[in-house]
């Protein structure tokens, strides 16, 4: 039979957890009636399918249409707003930006509402508001994300002004101010919550407090010193910090910090505190200004010879609490508050990472010298007995009380070595991708040894996939060749996949991204598993850290963007996610050539023995297919564009085949 001129398109889901032989049968099939332009993942684990100028969301387990939204043209960009069930989408022809609700497909046209060109946007964790700022003309638009409705939308001079303010006189130049239309409140830094449903902005030499409707509560000059001062025409280091326990907030600028009363905008401290840092942390027992490492380009950041000076500041008086400052040998790269009123800090100086624990009550370091680590720290966990670090150069384990190195005999790596790490219980595996070696470390005994001396793939391809299986075997693979080694380092499987690679760059790139994400996710989960074995997990008296760790694993974006501190917003976001993460990956994808069949396949191959679990035919059934892999759910969403000369629809039923021919 011959196809008609118009060939419809189908969209299928392939469950990666069901093992089948030969051609993979779809878990579900959805005929969407048009040529599929793109397939996107989303933060809700819901696949988004673009057909022309429409976007369709599908239920990931059944393929049922959740919603379909029509736009003015095709979309040129979908930008997730992490920690929220919303994305920004941009139309290709009009270039208009819309806020898309991923749960129901409804949109708010930001470009038409806000005027001007969108400059930036910020999520306010405390109120779960989304603040947009535009220029020429300057506008503010605030969206209530819980209600998905515009809270207020005003020009940046806030023309709808009250007749008076409640600002009080201050000997530091804080004068009562009636806002005038010539004051444009630009954005020097992200706004903060005023803890009453409104926002506080810093800009144009002013501090402006507005209520939930955009009306000004008060507007005052930013605090000034008699000599010099905090105010600069251009200052990108401005920072505001909410005090969650009192009627005040903090402004950091020009190396000075001042507390300001939220109620009326007056100064809360008798004098400024001179800050040695660019970031403020509210420790619960005082304020800690930190010098945070910022990498502007590869190898260019805080500076090799920079040091950090620390002191704890009393939130009530603005005075230093400690009698003497502490000094770190670098800028702070990572920090974590611990439950026993201590702060764990990791510094970096472009060469290596160091670690220290600060006793905030006494103003003392726990260790006589900072602990030098193997490489730059990727993640770390602090327990009551031990501290575990995953670094770019392997693993570090120290005794928490003394800083004693519990892996003193562990191997050292070249400075430019590319080290990949996998953790399985009490065993840590470090893969030296540069020198093609694998090391295994018993974390309970501190014994480390080289188990694979020189792995090698066809045509000298680089390592792109890796894992340690439940039986201890090590899975290593390039894009088209896999090897499996025993725990002792003996080669037990060597399976190459013959493939020219021509014409399927899209698949190769997608596989590389999927494997990279899966490897990273697996590392985080396995590190946590090893931590439990080592006594580093959720222990008595460490409930806050345990809660934070659970967010890091289930929805790390909540912790990264500080939304985890808003319980209502966190629950709202998690309740909309269709599926939870599943890192069970019995196989890996390879694009291979079957010479006998003279066909190319996207094959899902068992990591343990190289057996092909299922095949997806490529050139035989489709032209320029669209697909995406959702590593969080273990599904592959696949949209072939079927050849007009081939009506053997691999994933369609007989009825569907006959109806399309």
Image (cartoon, helix red, strand yellow):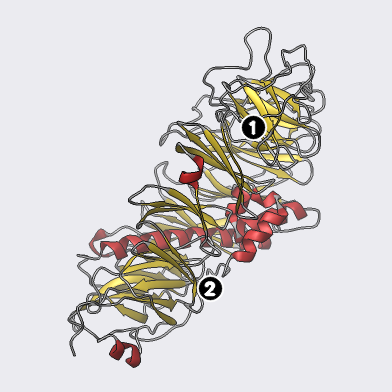
- Quarter of the image where one finds residue 654: bottom left
Q: Is residue 63 left or right of residue 655?
A: right
Q: First in sequence, mark 1 or 2: give its number.
A: 1
For the image, the number of numbered tags is: 2
Question: Residue 442 appears at what percent x and percent y?
Answer: 58, 60
Q: Is residue 593 left or right of residue 541?
A: left
- Give the answer, above or below, for where 270 lies relative to 53: above
Observer able to see residue 533? yes
Residue for badge 1:
160
Q: Quadrant of the N terminus?
A: bottom left
Observer able to see residue 452? no
The Cα atoms of the two marked residues, 1 and 2, are separated by 64 Å
| Crowd class of label 2 (few under 14; some 14 to 19; many from 20; radius 10 Å) | few
Question: Residue 152 appears at what percent x and percent y?
Answer: 62, 42
Question: Residue 353 appears at what percent x and percent y?
Answer: 55, 38
Q: Secondary structure at mark 1?
A: loop
Q: Are marks 1 and 2 in contact (CB under 8 Å)?
A: no
Residue for badge 2:
470
- Quarter of the image where one finds residue 661: bottom left
- Give the answer, above or below, for where 573 lies relative to 390: below
Q: For this rendering, which residue is in front, 193 or 116?
A: 116
For image coordinates 34% across by 72% down, the residue present is: 639
């Amino acid at each position: 039979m011959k196809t008609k001129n118009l060939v419809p398109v189908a969209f299928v889901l392939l469950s990666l957890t069901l093992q089948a032989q030969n051609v993979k049968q779809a878990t579900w099939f959805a005929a969407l009636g048009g040529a599929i332009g793109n397939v996107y993942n989303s933060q809700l684990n819901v696949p988004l399918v673009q057909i022309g100028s429409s976007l369709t969301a599908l239920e990931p387990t059944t393929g049922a249409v959740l919603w379909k939204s029509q736009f003015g043209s095709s979309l040129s960009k979908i930008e997730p707003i992490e920690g929220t069930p919303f994305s920004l989408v941009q139309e290709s022809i009009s270039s208009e930006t819309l806020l898309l609700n991923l749960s129901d497909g409804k949109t708010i046209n930001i470009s038409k509402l806000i005027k001007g060109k969108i400059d930036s946007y910020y999520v306010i964790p405390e109120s779960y508001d989304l603040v947009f700022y535009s220029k020429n003309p300057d506008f503010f638009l605030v969206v209530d994300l819980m209600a998905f409705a515009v809270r207020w939308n005003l020009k940046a001079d806030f023309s709808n002004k009250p007749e008076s303010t409640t600002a009080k006189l201050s000997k530091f130049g804080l004068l009562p101010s009636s806002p005038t239309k010539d004051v444009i409140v630009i954005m020097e830094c992200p706004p903060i919550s005023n803890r009453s449903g409104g926002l506080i902005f810093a800009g144009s030499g002013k501090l402006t407090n507005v209520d939930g409707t955009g009306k000004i509560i008060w507007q005052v000059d930013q605090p000034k010193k008699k000599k010099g001062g905090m105010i600069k025409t251009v200052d990108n280091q401005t920072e505001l910090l909410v005090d969650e326990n009192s009627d005040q907030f903090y402004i950091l600028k020009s190396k000075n910090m001042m507390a300001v009363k939220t109620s009326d905008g007056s100064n809360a401290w008798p004098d400024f505190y001179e800050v040695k840092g660019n970031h403020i942390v509210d420790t619960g027992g005082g304020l800690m200004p930190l010098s945070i490492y910022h990498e502007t380009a590869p190898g260019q950041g805080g500076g090799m010879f920079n040091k950090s000076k620390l002191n704890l500041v009393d939130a009530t008086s603005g005075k230093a609490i400690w009698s003497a400052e502490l000094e770190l040998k670098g800028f702070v790269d990572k920090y974590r508050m611990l439950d026993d009123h201590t702060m764990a800090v990791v510094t970096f100086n472009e060469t290596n990472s160091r670690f220290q624990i600060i006793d905030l009550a006494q103003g003392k370091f726990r260790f006589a010298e900072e602990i030098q680590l193997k490489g730059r720290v990727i993640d770390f966990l602090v327990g009551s007995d031990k501290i575990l670090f995953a670094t770019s150069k392997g693993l570090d384990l120290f005794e928490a009380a003394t800083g004693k190195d519990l892996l003193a005999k562990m191997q050292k790596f070249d400075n430019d070595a590319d080290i990949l790490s996998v953790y399985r219980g009490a065993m840590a595996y470090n893969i030296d991708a540069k020198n093609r070696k694998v090391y295994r470390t018993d974390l309970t005994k501190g014994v480390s040894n080289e188990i694979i001396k020189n792995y090698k793939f066809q045509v000298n391809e680089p390592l792109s996939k890796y894992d340690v299986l439940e039986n201890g075997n090590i899975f290593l693979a390039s894009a088209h060749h896999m090897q499996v080694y025993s725990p002792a380092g003996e080669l037990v499987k060597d399976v190459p996949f013959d493939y020219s690679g021509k014409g399927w760059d899209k698949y190769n790139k997608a596989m590389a991204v999927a494997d990279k994400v899966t490897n990273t996710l697996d590392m985080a989960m396995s590190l946590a598993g090893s931590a439990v074995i080592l006594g580093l997990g959720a222990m008595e008296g460490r409930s806050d850290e345990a809660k934070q760790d659970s967010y890091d694993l289930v929805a790390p974006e909540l912790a990264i963007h500080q939304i985890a501190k808003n319980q209502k917003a966190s629950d709202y976001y998690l309740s909309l996610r269709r599926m939870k993460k599943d890192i069970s990956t019995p196989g890996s994808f390879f694009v291979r050539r079957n010479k006998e069949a003279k066909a190319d396949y996207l094959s899902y191959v068992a990591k343990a023995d190289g057996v092909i679990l299922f095949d997806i035919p490529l050139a035989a059934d489709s032209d320029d297919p669209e697909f995406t892999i959702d590593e969080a759910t273990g599904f592959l969403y696949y949209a072939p564009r079927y050849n007009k000369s081939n009506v053997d629809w691999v994933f369609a039923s007989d009825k569907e085949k006959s109806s399309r021919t």
